[in-house]
Amino acid sequence: MSKQPQQRYAEAIVNRKARHEFEIIETFVAGIQLAGSEVKSVRLGQASLNESFAIILRNEVWLENMQITPYKHNRMEVLEAKRSRKLLLHKKEIAKLQAKVSEKGLTLVPLKAFFTPHGLLKIELAIARGKKLYDKRETLKNRENQRHLDQLRKQYS
């Protein structure tokens, strides 16, 4: 009898645009409330944090626009792919986030979703400020210069 190949699980779902579009000020880690089939989809890497954001409503933090593709073997009700999902934080953390986000120009952006060694899904949230176009160009220029310097060091080492 041959063994079936094991499915490879996703390491982490990363919001790659977030670090390009925003200046990260502070980060937090929050739990997320999901249905069982959604967890299975995230484990398979069928989730996206692109264009997602977090909001605070009635002292609760909600993650909006996180895309989780419905699990294909689910027999229960099919959930919306982009529904609002509650983030789990302590009251003090929520109060701190609310105070920071009330400042002009700051927002809550998810950076990545990852599983803990105990199998719990966590979301890394950041308090961020949007970058201007010239800031983005400057960041790219600095990154290219650093890459070039690293190549030169490697070449002459």
Image: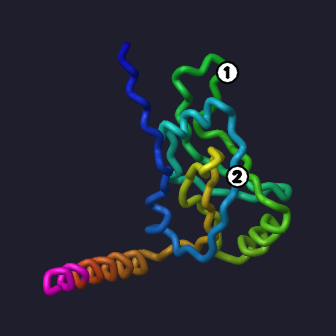
Query: Which corner quadrant holds the N terminus?
Result: top left
What SS does tag 1 mark?
loop
Of circles 2 and 1, the one toward us is: 2
Residue under the image location 44 percent in, 59 percent down: 16
In this rendering, the answer to whether 143 lies above or below 43 is below
At x 78%, y 68%, the residue is 98
Q: Which badge, 2 or 1, comes first in the chain's sequence?
A: 2
User: Does 11 sit above or below residue 80?
Assistant: below
Quarter where residue 60 is shown: bottom right
Is 91 above or below relative to 38?
Answer: below
Please tell me how crowded label 2 is: few (under 14), some (14-19), or many (20+) other residues with Cα within 10 Å: some
Secondary structure found at label 2: strand
**CA neighbours of label 1 inside 10 A, class few (<14), some (14 to 19), many (20+):** few
- Checking the image for residue 42, the label placed there is none
* Residue 18 rendering spot, x and y as whole percentages: 50, 63
Q: Looking at the image, which residue is at 56% across and 52% down?
A: 113
Residue in the image at 47% along x and 44% along y = 10
Alpha carbons under labels 2 and 1: distance apart: 23 Å
Q: Magenta segment range?
A: 150-157
- In the picture, the quarter occupied by the C terminus is bottom left
- In the picture provided, is 64 more to the left or to the right than 133? right
- The residue that mark 1 highlights is 77
User: For the residue marked with disc 1, what is the amino acid?
Assistant: Glu
The residue wearing badge 2 is 31
